[in-house]
Amino acid sequence: MEFDYIIVGAGSAGCVLANRLSADPAVSVCLLEAGPRDWSPLVHAPAGVAAILPTRHVNWAFDTVPQPGLAGRRGYQPRGKVLGGSSSINGMIYIRGHQSDYDEWAALGNSGWSFADVLPYFRKSQMHHRGASEFHGGEGELYVGQIEAHAATHAFIEAGQKAGHRYNADFNGAEQEGIGQYDVTIRGGRRWSTATAFLKPIRGARRNLTVLTGATAERVLLQGKQASGVQVQIKGESLTLKARREVLLSAGAFGTPQLLMLSGIGPESELKPQGIAVTHEMPGVGQNLQDHPDVVLGYQSTDNSLLGYSLGGSLKMGSALAQYLARKRGPLASNFAEGGGFLKTRAELVRPDIQLHSVVSLLDDHNRKLHWGHGFSCHVCVLRPKSIGSVGLQSVNPKAPPRIDPAFLSHDDDVQTLLKGYRMAREIIAQAPMARFGLKDKFSDGLHSDEQLIDLLRRRTDSIYHPVGTCRMGNDELAVVDSQLRVHGIQGLRVVDASIMPTLVGGNTNAPTIMIAERAAEWIANTR
């Protein structure tokens, strides 16, 4: 089979690319996804994230290598294995990051990536619940709204103000700092993934778009220094798909560098031990892995309106299921992480350096450890960690997981920032508005000294699922793509996903990834 464009990965970026490129009826587009179609009801009910997160259901469920900074533990990296990719299993929070993040990208030599440059592409894809404005779009495919939040979420926001933090009604507006309720990609009680927003409306309507699920990309095919197609495995059979114009890699911060290396594009030190011939030496492939280290404060509660496991809770959940099935409302229409904030651990900072996510249930180890009773949680993450990791190969088998080493808490500045953030979150939850929920500290009760809390951080910190940077954009010898996301030294090959980010943005990464695809689609369509 032959197409003009082959897109590897139908996730947050790939679905956007498929939509934009196939809008031209004169071109043919093939979208490849290793996972299944998004049939699962757990994908579409927002509360389904609680069941998907700890399992292998539409989830790659990767493990990291042992982390010295986390007391030798292996970290956990859920990633979407389904149409919509991680936008089909994430927390549905819509955050762009701080405006200065993009100005820094431009200052690093990446022209066209300042905040002024990228804002129109954020706005293009967005249908904001408040309508169009300076910072929001009103006619895009991606619905961004707010949900009916739990009383504990409102109490948390009030508690944040009592602790001295400003209220922020829009983290994606003029200012990011403050405490407030999150905008979410939920519409009418259903998850609004990129598959729902960008792919579903055009599938079947555009004959020039072919979507193949259960399709594992084995390697990018090259003719000299020209990408000519993709070798893909479907139902155990290897097929050759040819690309007349470009191959576009949107397999994410783990999958894209893995596929490049399996194709002989990457550092010789990584390829040679696996017996892979070096087709194009690129030392930066798989380097520069950045992710937000995150720790969760957990509290047991006497209030069974919070989510949890009890006889009364089970009865309420049955009622909630009936409510959801009838009207797509109630607890199951929530992402649970309804509120949060962006705060500075030092007053002199020019932008927030920690992010909070309040959650109306007791979370432990990515929901893999369950506790009897009801509770409340608060995530604290470091927005711009100095700990930098890498992605490599463990096998030549494309279905084998890559080697993931985020190097969490390997830099002491990250430890100190997380420690300050932990104390700030504790202070918020200690405020009077939270008292009605009868909260009792589950994991750090009686721990107060820096030494005690740092030991706790090393035992409980892990990812909040924002890996980026492993095929970073730039012009130096470790950069993988240029400012228009073309792989250096290879014709007809681009990377379009979160792996191109030169630095990690200060916030959740789904919205920036969609923006990256919007930005790239225009360049690709204008290349002939």
Image: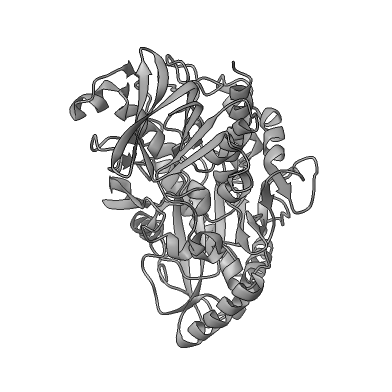
What colouring does the structure picture have?
one colour
Relative height, residue 29 to residue 452 (above, below): above
Q: Quadrant of residue 431?
A: bottom right
Q: Relative to the observer, which residue lies in front, 23 or 2?
A: 2
Q: Quadrant of residue 353?
A: top right
The percent position of residue 12, horizontal first and vertical second, equals: 54, 43
Q: Determine whether, in the image, residue 237 is placed left or right of residue 307.
A: left
Q: How many badges with numbers are in the image?
A: 0
The percent position of residue 227, horizontal first and vertical second, equals: 41, 19
Q: Relative to the observer, which residue lies in front, 188 or 121?
A: 188
User: Is residue 286 at least partly visible in the picture?
Assistant: no
- Identify which residue is drawn at 72% across, 57% down: 167
User: Is residue 135 at least partly visible in the picture?
Assistant: yes
The percent position of residue 116, horizontal first and vertical second, equals: 71, 29
Q: Relative to the observer, which residue lies in front, 50 or 505?
A: 50
- Identify which residue is drawn at 46% across, 87% down: 311
Relative height, residue 92 to residue 490 (above, below): below
Q: Relative to the observer, which residue lies in front, 296 or 501?
A: 501
Q: Quadrant of the N terminus?
A: top left
The percent position of residue 314, horizontal first and vertical second, equals: 48, 83
- Identify which residue is drawn at 55% across, 41% down: 15
Q: Quadrant of residue 2?
A: top left
Q: Determine whether, in the image, residue 403 is placed left or right of residue 4.
A: left
Relative height, residue 54 to residue 196 (above, below): below
Q: Quadrant of the C terminus?
A: top right
Relative height, residue 107 to residue 315 (above, below): above
